[in-house]
Amino acid sequence: MRNEVRISGFGGQGIVLAGVILGRGAALYDDKNAVQTQSYGPEARGGASKSEVVISQEEIDYPKVIKPDVLVCMSQQAFDKYCRDIKEGGTVIVDRDLVTVPEDFYNGNVKVYKIPFTEIAYKDIGLKIVANMVMLGALVRITGIVSKEAIRKAILDSVPKDTEEKNLMAFEKGYSYLK
């Protein structure tokens, strides 16, 4: 089964890194096929950013996200731009403190999770910059698209040396946020 994930926000939030980790976890540690693509505005830091990951047990014949099963928005601008692309019955995950989702969004035909990624990162880890790892934890817990252990290994492969512990702590906080 083909699963399409779009992670979006603004430059500087680690959107691309989160997509790379998700794809790496699927491909290297969960024995799935995965393709990751990315784009960001010319402003880079502060501009629009998105990372798309296609994960499948079968061969992937088209590497782009057509209509995401899962949409993650870590900024209002990203939500406003991509909110109508989600598949009916899909999953939308937003940073509760940065994104406002209208009450009648999609007429209730999608699952919406509002999680304070940035607040958790700041209050529990002491670093806003690991909000992307908090988000990955929640994403893995909600969707099960990649195993927890695969993402933990991919985080260790992907983050700068001497930041592994804080990144893993942030991932665990996001994963355990939803009991």
Image (spheres, rainbow, N blue to C red):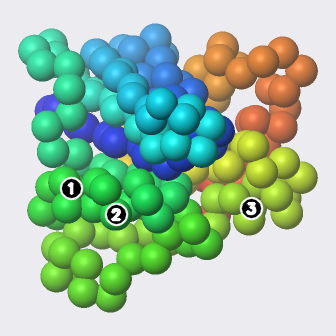
Looking at the rendered structure, the kind of residue marked 2 is Asp
Percent x, y of residue 153: 63, 21
Camera-side residue of 159 and 171: 159
* Gap between marks 1 and 3 measured at Cα: 26 Å
Percent x, y of residue 106: 19, 75
Q: Left of 21 or right of it: where is 86?
A: left
Percent x, y of residue 110: 23, 69
User: Which of the two labelled residues, at mark 2 and mark 3, occupies the earlier sequence position?
Assistant: 2
Looking at the rendered structure, the kind of residue marked 1 is Ile
Residue indicated by mark 1:
86
How packed mark 3 is, by other alpha carbons closer than 10 Å (few <14, some 14-19, many 20 or more), is: many
Residue indicated by mark 2:
80
Q: Residue at x 23, y 48 (%)?
A: 69
Residue 118 vs 171, above or below: the answer is below
Residue indicated by mark 3:
120
- Determine the secondary structure under disc 3: helix
Of tags 2 and 1, the one toward the viewer is 2
Q: Left of 57 or right of it: where is 111?
A: right
Q: Residue at x 39, y 77 (%)?
A: 101
Percent x, y of residue 157: 66, 14
Quarter the N terminus occupies = top left
Residue 71 vs 2, above or below: the answer is below
How packed mark 1 is, by other alpha carbons closer than 10 Å (few <14, some 14-19, many 20 or more), is: many
User: Which of the two labelled residues, at mark 1 and mark 3, occupies the earlier sequence position?
Assistant: 1
Where on the picture, by quarter, is residue 104?
bottom left
Where on the picture, by quarter, is residue 156?
top right
Q: Is residue 54 visible?
A: yes
Where on the picture, by quarter, is residue 32?
top left
Looking at the rendered structure, the kind of residue marked 3 is Ile
* Gap between marks 2 and 1 measured at Cα: 12 Å
Number of marks in picture: 3
